Amino acid sequence: MSRRGNCHDNAVAESFFQLLKRERIRRKIYPTRQEAHSDVFSYIEMFYNPIRRHSSADGLSPIEFERRNSVRLAAI
């Protein structure tokens, strides 16, 4: 929850929703609410979470980051 006067509280959430709107929602017109819901769910679960590269993970996708991290931990 955002505290009054702290602009950084929602930075991560606002960044995500800005990307969602730019990469998916603004490019389409959805005939029904269900199609919009399905498309947003698909974007998040099938692309954003597993595949999309994240700057916080050195430009790696979450799958690649976890693979490299598990290999590194196995070597310890």
Image (cartoon, rainbow, N blue to C red):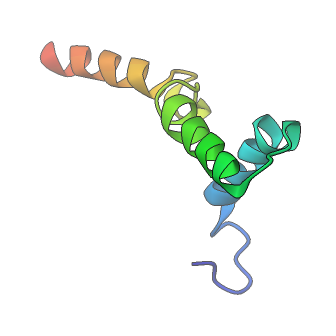
Give percent across and percent down for residue 16.
66, 49
Answer left or right for 7 relative to 67.
Answer: right
Give percent across and percent down for residue 11.
67, 59
Q: Is residue 76 visible?
A: no
Q: What residue occupies the far bottom of the structure in this picture?
A: 4
**Which is more toward the observer, 30 or 49?**
30
Answer left or right for 34 relative to 46.
Answer: right
Q: Quadrant of the C terminus?
A: top left
Q: Measuring 23% from the left and 14% from the top, which residue is drawn there?
A: 71
Q: Is residue 52 visible?
A: yes
Q: Measuring 86% from the left and 36% from the top, which residue is drawn there?
A: 27
Give percent across and percent down for residue 45.
49, 38
Q: Quadrant of the N terminus?
A: bottom right
Q: How many marks?
A: 0
Q: What residue occupies the far front of the structure in this picture?
A: 31
Give percent across and percent down for residue 2.
63, 78
Q: Measuring 63% from the left and 58% from the top, which residue is drawn there?
A: 13
Quadrant of the rendered structure where residue 47 is?
top right
**Which is more toward the observer, 18 or 76?**
18
On screen, residue 3 above or below 9: below
Quadrant of the rendered structure where residue 38 is?
top right
On screen, residue 10 above or below 64: below
Q: Measuring 44% from the left and 28% from the top, which residue is drawn there?
A: 62
